[in-house]
Image (cartoon, rainbow, N blue to C red):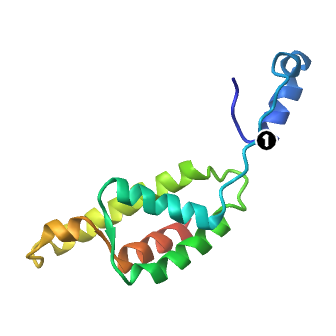
């Protein structure tokens, strides 16, 4: 079994005529939509018992736009990319919690909340790349 991006896999298989004969079957999986990427992002959060502030729903539209933009890249890894973005979000949350720890009386709740600021910081971080 081989797996990879379609254009790169075509180049790989065409590099040696015997390879395409040894791997005659190709299965192409469609990319997730930007909306589905947001749902996967929310699923990752839910699995780790994170909750979103009510106001975050507005920011998720921004995140959907970001996924739409990222999906145009040839190296966009879809759900794997969403997992990486979720991990970046957790780092942003930890940074926020550390910065606010001395001022926060209820840090346990702050530790498990995804805030508007967290999503905004994720978008800012990604648009710098």
Left or right: 81 as drawn, with respect to 68: left
Residue at left 85%, top 23%? Answer: 24
Residue with the most extreme right position: 17
63 relative to 4, above or below: below
Return the x and y of residue 19 as percentages of the image width and height. Answer: 84, 19
Q: Is residue 30 left or right of residue 45?
A: right
Q: Quadrant of the N terminus?
A: top right
The image quarter in which residue 36 lies: bottom right
Secondary structure type for disc 1: helix
> Residue at left 73%, top 50%?
30
Q: Position of residue 18 (x, y in %)?
A: 88, 15
Residue 25 in the image, given as x and y percentages of width and height: 82, 26
Number of other residues with Cα within 10 Å of mark 1, as a class: few under 14, some 14 to 19, many 20 or more: some
Q: In the rendered image, which residue does mark 1 sit on?
A: 6
Q: Quadrant of residue 53?
A: bottom left
The image shows a total of numbered marks equal to: 1
Identify the residue at horizontal 81%, vertical 21% (top origin). 23
The quadrant holding residue 86 is bottom left
Identify the residue at horizontal 47%, vertical 69% (top origin). 125
Position in image of residue 73 (x %, y %):
70, 58
Q: Is residue 62 left or right of residue 30?
A: left
Decide: is 81 above or below 58: above
**Compared to 27, does 103 lie above or below?**
below
């Amino acid at each position: 079994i081989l797996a990879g991006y379609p254009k790169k896999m075509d180049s790989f298989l065409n590099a040696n005529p015997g390879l395409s004969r040894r791997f005659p079957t190709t299965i192409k999986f469609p990319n997730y939509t930007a909306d589905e990427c947001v749902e996967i992002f929310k699923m990752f959060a839910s699995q780790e018992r994170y909750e979103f502030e009510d106001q975050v729903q507005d920011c998720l539209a921004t995140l959907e736009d970001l996924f739409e933009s990222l999906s145009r890249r040839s190296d966009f890894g879809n759900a794997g990319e969403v997992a990486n973005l979720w991990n970046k979000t957790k780092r942003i949350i930890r940074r926020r919690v550390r910065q606010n720890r001395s001022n926060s009386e209820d840090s346990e709740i702050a530790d498990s909340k995804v805030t508007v600021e967290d999503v905004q910081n994720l978008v800012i971080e990604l648009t710098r790349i």
